[in-house]
Amino acid sequence: MSTPPATPRRATITDVAREAGTGKTSISRYLNGEMNVLSPELRARIEAAIARLDYQPNQMARGLKRGRNRLIGMLLADLTNPYSVEVLQGVEAACHALGLMPLICHAANEVEMERRYLQLLTTYRVEGVIVNALGVREETLRPVGGGGIPAVLVDRQVEGLVADMVGLDNRAAAELGARHLLEQGFEHIWFVVQPFERVSSRHLRVQAFDDALRAHGRARGHTLVLDLADPAEVERGLAELDRAIDAVSGARHDGRDGGSANSKRTADNAGEPARIALFAANAPVALCLALHLKTRYGAHWQTRVALLSIDDPDWAELAGITTIRQPTYEIGYRAVEFLHERIEGVQTRARDCLLPGELIVRASTSR
Amino acid sequence: MSTPPATPRRATITDVAREAGTGKTSISRYLNGEMNVLSPELRARIEAAIARLDYQPNQMARGLKRGRNRLIGMLLADLTNPYSVEVLQGVEAACHALGLMPLICHAANEVEMERRYLQLLTTYRVEGVIVNALGVREETLRPVGGGGIPAVLVDRQVEGLVADMVGLDNRAAAELGARHLLEQGFEHIWFVVQPFERVSSRHLRVQAFDDALRAHGRARGHTLVLDLADPAEVERGLAELDRAIDAVSGARHDGRDGGSANSKRTADNAGEPARIALFAANAPVALCLALHLKTRYGAHWQTRVALLSIDDPDWAELAGITTIRQPTYEIGYRAVEFLHERIEGVQTRARDCLLPGELIVRASTSR
DNA sequence: CTGTTAGCGCATTCAT
DNA sequence: ATGAATGCGCTAACAG
């Protein structure tokens, strides 16, 4: 009538040794694949014992002993962004290939969370970290060759941290988008981006956009900062945008519905009406814009304003929005490769891996 | 001229003890918050030493010793599905609250991966697992009270496994959707779902849909299975759907474009044309359908067929699609709570937590 | 209140 | 080719 232990204690290496009638050392050797030093006979006995006991080596213990546990941390600012999930796929594939186990930490856009998670990862003695965060400004991380643990950055640089980085070639991508818009004849182009002081990639995109428009000369470029985390700010920003749109396309907006079904898609006045183009710095921004435009101008909002976005979320195809797709999978994969090299002790100076984006033209930016 | 060690070995409890001029035990006590047994004086010295050495206890070692490491596994079939990410948010929040650390494993819809990950988790001695998978049929998991490690299921039951489960009230949800469609007057309704033999939630949805339509009597219900993993199968399924649509709405489809901009949204013939309604069992299916319909009928596909979906992805609002939103956050949160209780040794019999979905009516199903 | 001792499960000398 | 002993960093009796 005794209560059986809640968890029937898993077999340990000692159990296996006893079961196989040998010493722990041999078991350990077997586990580490040192087959050439084991008589086929012993090896067979060990195999049997392991199977019989359903033995599985304790990674924690192994890690403790040899000082490495094959764990790496993956710090993500926002899993809600499809970009993150896609990068993650690459990360997982690479980890799989390299025998690493990624600990995925989702900071949900909270800087405090990032700090906590980084500290937690450190506490679990991960061998390295892949960081895609917004507020990390930690000494925990290793400035190539310094203290801390090896880190590689994804998508964004971290101020004061010299480390490997992999991400989109932001300058080229923003330029690509701007050029496309210009070629399509848009003369009023707004670049819409989240606050970019702390996020290098956003900063680069803004800059490249500015440069591209300045170089072109004729068209007028503007930048709008939209803090998606702050509803009030979003509202203000969108209101500003609305004014700009009205100004450009001649304030034809006269009520709740800008003439959805009845206003044919053909030009209203001789020659195309001056359409305005919005260039979203990433998918979340694009979605926010699209939603707003739809409620303001109705289902046909795309006849009023063109939308182009960096990132290529699955709904872009459905909405017919032109995008610049990032090589997300490769980004994740390369990041792990970099990290792995660092973990293995590579000492070269910090590297930047900038991958090109691909323009996918859809209806939104066609005439 | 000696090369400093790549990783400057982190301080251990022994280092701290030496630095503080005391024994390891006191340090350990401090770490575990047994403050009442420490003289303020010693305590201060320890604090100082810890700060000076930037000491952080090694969780692996702690875990090894006390037999628990506060790690739980979270096995996800498909992170690409927004549902998963949302559930994850709840999981993370709960873990945070309960002092647990989730190891997130993404199986990318591959049964083999699920097996591997489960094995890996076991190897890291996680204290429990939250499972949302498609092929798990493992003895690894613990049938409540049995061997293995504690598990709680999310969204789907696992054949032959008696364990806690939390998810949507599928029967009620499918019924809710069906009823809404019927109330809107649709008489031809197709339920579209991924292969559901192995996924209990899908099965329940199909059943409830069937029942609802049977009960109603007048309208005709059909079920279409769409294996999103197999492009050829998808094509076949969509073709079948196309035929059905043509049959119902009178094969008005006469070419590449079903008269997008020119066919006003008003009725073509006296009285509403018989629109057909599609009921997607989840977001991925809904997206697939929407994309197809759009390429077949053009931007105005929604005048031809109504779409309703379980799951409420962010693009649903943009596309104006009626949905049934799942209480994803709560699902994740509850799952962790259940698991935590099991870990703490609760022995009650397996529980099911069925949460209600919420109907969000949008343009797609309005007249 | 505080320190000593003995493992947790495993890998690694070093013998044999 | 094999095994015994030692210790990774930490906690948990058990003394003082």
Image (tube, coloured by chain):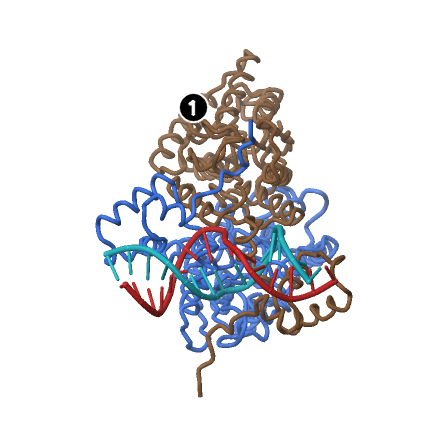
Chain colours: A blue, B brown, C red, D cyan
* Residue B176 visible from this viewpoint: yes
Q: Residue furthest right?
A: B40
Secondary structure of residue under mark 1: helix
* Residue A98 drawn at (x, y percent): 37, 58
In the displayed structure, would residue A311 be above or below residue A9? below
Q: Residue at (49%, 19%) from the top-left corner? A: B221
Location of residue A90 in the rendering, given as x and y in whole percent from the top left corner: 43, 55
Left or right: A159 as drawn, with respect to B254: right
Q: Nearer the viewer, residue A343 or B307?
A: A343
Q: Is residue A365 visible?
A: no
The answer to which of A142 and A309 lies nearer the viewer is A142
Relative image position of residue A332 (x, y in whole percent): 45, 59
Q: Is residue B296 left or right of residue B71?
A: left
Q: What's the chain of the residue with tag 1?
A: B
Answer with the quarter of the image where residue A196 lies: bottom right
Task: Give the camera-side residue of A364 and B353.
Answer: B353
Residue A289, x across and y down, in percent: 62, 52
Above or below A17: residue B343: above
- Bin the neighbour count of mark 1 within 10 Å (Cα to Cα): few under 14, some 14-19, many 20 and up: some
Q: Name the residue tied to disc 1.
A: B244
The amino acid marked with disc number 1 is Ala
